[in-house]
Every structure is written in structure tokens, then in C-alpha cells.
């Protein structure tokens, strides 16, 4: 929905930080002193309409995402989850068996760092995938606070992740 000059995604359609954490297939941190970091992007159809199931699943497969654990899609590297994609509508399921009866106002992409890839490579992959999905689904990207994901927001996200990686000796 639009509020003033800032475009936002409706709050009731966005998973909470806890539900994102619960849905993530977290990897054990290599060192117990490493703080976890959640990175999330939201994707919503530009005109505010629902996206039908066949388009959603085709776009997810075109991005080489794999359906799996927790009835959502994942980017896997050597069998480990780098990031995941779920429906904006709770509980977030994206079951391909229900393609013909399914629709959603959008998707959430999320990852828990550290993961199986270097943090900047993982975030770069997720950003590229998010852009590809947005284009295929006539959707707009938003940050985790439901604000339009601008080039400035992208730079801030990358700086934040790089800072986190340095603090945790992961870069």
C-alpha cells in the first residue's frame, strides 16, 4: 500500500522476524561467538494484485530454486541452504502440488548468516535472484522494513553485511 511518498508492503502480509527465523534452515555457526544475521527482502506485485501459482512456480524454477523443507523454495549449494523463498501470506507455503489453486500478493526472500557461502557472495546471489523474480512477476522489491528497495538501500545492505562479516571474521 502507499502511505504518503513512501511505498510500503502491508504489515499483515509480512512474516515477522521470528517467523523468518523459524522458517529458515539455519546452519550451525562455525564459531559460537559468531552472531547470526538475518537478511530479508520482500517482493510484491506492482499493481497490488495477487500473483497466480503457475507464474510463481515457473519464476522460482527459472531462478534454479528448489522446492523442499518447510514447503518453500531454497537456493542450495552442495545440499546446504543459502537462502529461502516463501509466500508473503502465512504460513508461507509454496507447494507446487497446489499451483493451480494458489496465489499470493508476493514473496519474501531470506537468509540466516553465516551460511554455506561467503556472506557477500550469498547476498549477491539473493539480490540477483530477487531481481529476476521481480522482473518475471511484475513485482517491486522492498527491504525488510517494507520500504522500496532503492539503489541506496542496496548499498546500505551491502555495507551492513560486509561490516557484520568483518566483525565476525568471515570476510
Image: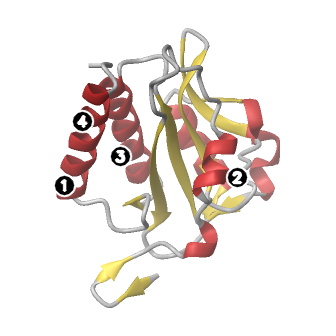
| Labels 1 & 4 near each other (Cβ < 8 A) | no
Distance of label 1 from label 3 (alpha carbons): 12 Å
Q: Is residue 163 above or below residue 16?
A: above
Q: Residues within 10 Å of mark 2 (few under 14, many from 20)?
A: many
Give the residue at x 28% y 29%.
167
In terms of secondary structure, where does tag 2 sit? loop
Q: Secondary structure at mark 3?
A: helix
Residue corresponding to mark 3: 131
The location of residue 110, given as percent across then percent down, is: 51, 43
* Location of residue 59 in the rendering, given as x and y in whole percent from the top left corner: 53, 42
The residue tagged 2 is 92
Kindly identify which residue carries mark 4.
163
Side of 148 where 78 appears, left or right? right
| First reached walking from the N terminus: tag 1 or tag 3 | 3
**Is the residue 136 above or below the residue 118 in the image?**
below
Q: Mark 1 vs mark 4: give the one in front.
A: 4
Q: Relative to the observer, which residue lies in front, 90 or 27?
A: 27
Q: Secondary structure at mark 1?
A: helix
In 3D space, how far apart are the residues under numbered discs 3 and 4 (Cα atoms)?
23 Å
Label 4: few (<14), some or many (≥20) within 10 Å? some
CA neighbours of label 1 inside 10 A, class few (<14), some (14 to 19), many (20+): few
Q: Residues within 10 Å of mark 3 (few under 14, many from 20)?
A: some
Q: Nearer the viewer, mark 3 or mark 2?
A: 2
Mark 2 or 4, which is nearer the eye?
4
The earlier-in-sequence mark between 1 and 4 is 1
Whether pointer 1 and pointer 3 mark residues with C-beta atoms closer than 8 Å, the reply is: no
Q: Earlier in the sequence, mark 3 or mark 4?
A: 3
* Residue 130 horizontal side relative to residue 66, left or right: left
| 32 vs 120, nearest the viewer | 32
Whichever of callouts 2 and 4 sits on the residue coming sooner in the sequence is: 2
Mark 2–mark 4 distance (CA, rounded to whole Å)? 30 Å
**Residue 151, labelled with which disc?**
1
Amino acid at each position: 500500500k502507499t502511505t504518503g511518498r513512501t511505498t510500503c508492503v502491508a504489515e499483515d502480509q509480512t512474516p515477522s522476524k521470528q517467523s523468518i527465523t523459524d522458517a529458515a534452515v539455519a546452519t550451525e555457526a562455525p564459531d559460537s561467538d559468531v552472531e547470526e544475521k538475518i537478511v530479508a527482502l520482500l517482493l510484491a506485485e506492482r499493481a497490488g494484485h495477487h500473483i497466480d501459482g503457475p507464474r510463481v512456480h515457473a519464476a522460482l524454477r527459472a531462478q534454479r530454486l528448489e522446492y523442499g523443507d518447510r514447503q518453500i523454495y531454497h537456493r542450495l549449494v552442495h545440499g546446504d541452504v543459502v537462502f529461502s523463498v516463501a509466500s508473503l501470506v502465512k504460513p508461507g507455503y509454496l507447494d507446487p502440488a497446489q499451483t493451480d489453486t494458489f496465489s499470493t500478493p508476493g514473496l519474501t526472500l531470506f537468509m540466516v548468516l553465516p551460511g554455506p557461502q561467503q556472506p557477500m557472495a550469498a547476498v549477491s546471489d539473493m539480490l540477483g535472484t530477487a531481481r529476476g523474480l521481480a522482473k518475471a512477476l511484475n513485482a517491486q522489491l522492498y527491504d525488510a522494513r517494507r520500504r522500496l528497495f532503492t539503489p541506496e538501500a542496496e548499498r546500505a545492505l551491502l555495507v551492513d553485511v560486509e561490516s557484520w562479516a568483518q566483525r565476525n571474521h568471515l570476510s
